Image (cartoon, grey):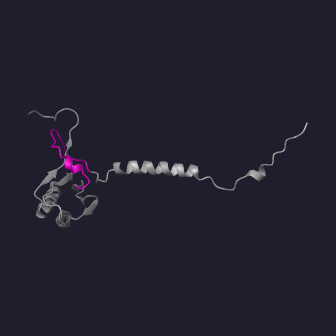
Amino acid sequence: MGIAVRNEARRVSSNINVTPMVDVMLVLLIIFMVITPMLQNKVSVDMAKVDNPTNMPDADKEDAIVVAITRDGGVFLGQNKVATSELGAQVREKLADKPGKTIFVRADARAQFRAVEDAIDAVRTAGVEDVGLLTQKREGGSAAGGE
């Protein structure tokens, strides 16, 4: 009875097999390509809730100009925080090639009215005719109180 001796040292390959790594990287690339457009690039505000909001589908478009006012009075043009005194000039600059466009305002429900009013005044001073105030539909039943 003999012992079978295998000489595996001769057949060992020193090359790295990168195929599994490439597969994993391609899957990650696809995942990031799918998820990236879904990420919200909006300033987080808790908008006022109303029973019958006006539908403004243009506010969701990528080229929409949105001014957000946070609870603490911060004013954002898109994702960039701006001072209220500079808001009009920046809006005018963005509208240089698109006259007659609507500017949308997303104000926090608990923001001071003065901050919202100042932002709208700055936008109107920049020459904007149409300003849309964005709200959310109230979930559940009707509002408390009688009509």
Task: Give the residues drawn in magenta, as a range.
Answer: 45-63
Residue furthest left as drawn: 147
Side (left or right) of 41 relative to 21: left
Provide the major secondary structure of the magenta segment. Answer: loop
Task: Out of 5 and 59, give the one closest to the viewer.
Answer: 5
Q: Indicate the position of residue 100 as horizontal and vertical percent values.
A: 12, 58
Side (left or right) of 27 relative to 105: right
Look at the picture and state if 100 lies above or below 20. below
Task: Out of 98 and 65, give the one closest to the viewer.
Answer: 98
Q: Residue at x 10, y 33 (%)?
A: 146
Look at the picture and state if 28 lies above or below 1. below
Q: Indicate the position of residue 14 as horizontal and vertical percent values.
A: 69, 56
Task: Out of 22 and 116, give the one closest to the viewer.
Answer: 22
Q: Is residue 134 magenta?
A: no
Q: Is residue 49 magenta?
A: yes
Side (left or right) of 68 relative to 29: left
**How many numbered dots are placed on residues in this image?**
0
Q: Quadrant of the N terminus?
A: top right
Task: Out of 38 and 46, give the one closest to the viewer.
Answer: 38
Look at the picture and state if 23 lies above or below 93. above
Q: Residue at x 42, y 51 (%)?
A: 32
Look at the picture and state if 3 lies above or below 88. above
Q: Quadrant of the C terminus?
A: top left
Does residue 27 appear in this view?
yes
Q: Residue at x 85, y 41 (%)?
A: 4
Does residue 74 appear in this view?
no
Q: Residue at x 15, y 57 (%)?
A: 101
Q: Indicate the position of residue 40 as horizontal and vertical percent values.
A: 32, 50
Residue furthest front as drawn: 11
Q: Indicate the position of residue 97 as horizontal and vertical percent values.
A: 18, 64
